[in-house]
Image: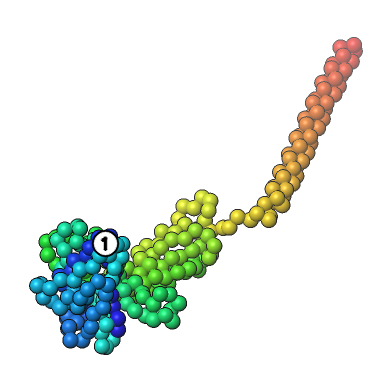
């Protein structure tokens, strides 16, 4: 097994010691006789020899690495870092990587854990990986996993997209649990994460508008027909009332003559 740590420190990186452990509590150390060191700069073995009198240093210039080749399969779950005590000689960001071979289609190195904002000064710091997550299962059928970095390890990131073409979001493995995927699968009026994303229908846009106009026109015709029918009924009622009044007036006149 081959493991390495990558520093993004832009200046000179001074390392007193890096101790690797196979348990998350940093108690079971991976012993020196089981490994050999490699790295940029001179004497990378000094980074792992556990002697404070020796020191590994390298001019990173933006990025540099130091690692171990183990003579058997191992899993690094934790590490302690004792580095320079000032910002000019220490890094705040470190990446733990494992060699997985070129068969994966990438560079051969897999990011296992990213450590950010590492404390500088005050002696060694303990950096834990955390627990691995179970296999990521999309919450909804319309979620499509487009990429996954770091496998299922602590700090792994899964990118999910709506129906494989809509908006996307990330879920991160955090000490055995995947973070909540805050993804809205709809362009317009999305209020909850469960709404389905609907892609714009450019080809049917014109026909949809025409259909809407036809429906509105038909409704207007019905409304006009109703108004016309109501007006005719009112006219007939008024005509009948006038005829009744004339009939009664004519009858009263005949009675008076008699």
Tell me the residue that label 1 is attached to. 9
Question: Which of 220/107 is in front?
Answer: 107
Question: Which of 2/150 is in front?
Answer: 2
- Residue appearing at x 40%, y 75% in the figure: 107
- Residue appearing at x 26%, y 88% in the figure: 71
Q: Position of residue 171 (x, y in %)?
A: 38, 65
- Which quadrant holds residue 244? top right
Label count reads 1
Q: Residue furthest left?
A: 53
Determine whether 195 is above or below 227 in the image: below
Residue 233 visible, this orientation: no
Q: Position of residue 144 (x, y in %)?
A: 49, 68
Determine whether 177 is above or below 242 in the image: below
Q: Residue furthest front?
A: 42
- Residue appearing at x 35%, y 69% in the figure: 156
- Residue appearing at x 72%, y 52% in the figure: 207
Q: Position of residue 47 (x, y in %)?
A: 18, 74
Determine whether 253 is above or below 138 in the image: above
Quick check: 9 left or right of 167? left
In the rendered image, which quarter contains the C terminus? top right
Q: Dot 1 lies on which element?
A: loop
For label 1, the crowd category at 10 Å Cα-Cα, with few meaning under 14, some 14 to 19 and many 20 or more, is many
In the rendered image, which quarter contains the N terminus? bottom left
Question: Which of 83/225 is in front?
Answer: 83
């Amino acid at each position: 097994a081959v493991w390495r740590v990558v520093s993004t420190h832009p200046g000179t990186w001074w390392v007193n010691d890096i101790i690797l452990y196979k348990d998350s509590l940093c108690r079971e150390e991976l012993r020196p006789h089981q490994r050999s060191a490699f790295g940029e700069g001179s004497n990378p073995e000094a980074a792992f020899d556990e002697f404070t009198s020796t020191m590994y240093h390298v001019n990173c210039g933006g990025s540099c690495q130091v690692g171990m080749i183990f003579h058997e399969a191992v899993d690094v779950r934790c590490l302690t870092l004792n580095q320079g005590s000032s910002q000019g000689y220490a890094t705040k960001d470190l990446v733990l990587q494992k060699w997985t071979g070129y068969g994966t289609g990438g560079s051969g190195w897999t990011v296992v854990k990213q450590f950010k904002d590492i404390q500088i000064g005050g002696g060694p710091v303990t950096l834990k990986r955390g627990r691995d997550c179970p296999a990521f299962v999309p919450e909804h059928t319309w979620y499509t996993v487009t990429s996954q970095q770091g496998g299922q390890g602590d700090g792994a990131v899964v990118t999910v997209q709506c129906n494989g073409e809509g908006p996307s979001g990330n879920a991160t493995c955090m000490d055995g649990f995947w973070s909540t995927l805050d993804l809205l699968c709809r362009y317009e009026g999305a209020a909850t994460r469960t709404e389905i994303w609907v892609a714009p229908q450019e080809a049917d846009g014109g026909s949809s508008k025409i259909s809407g106009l036809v429906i509105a026109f038909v409704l207007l015709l019905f409304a006009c027909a109703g108004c016309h029918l109501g007006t005719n009924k009112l006219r007939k009622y008024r005509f009948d009332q006038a005829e009744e009044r004339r009939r009664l007036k004519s009858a009263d006149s005949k009675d008076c003559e008699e």
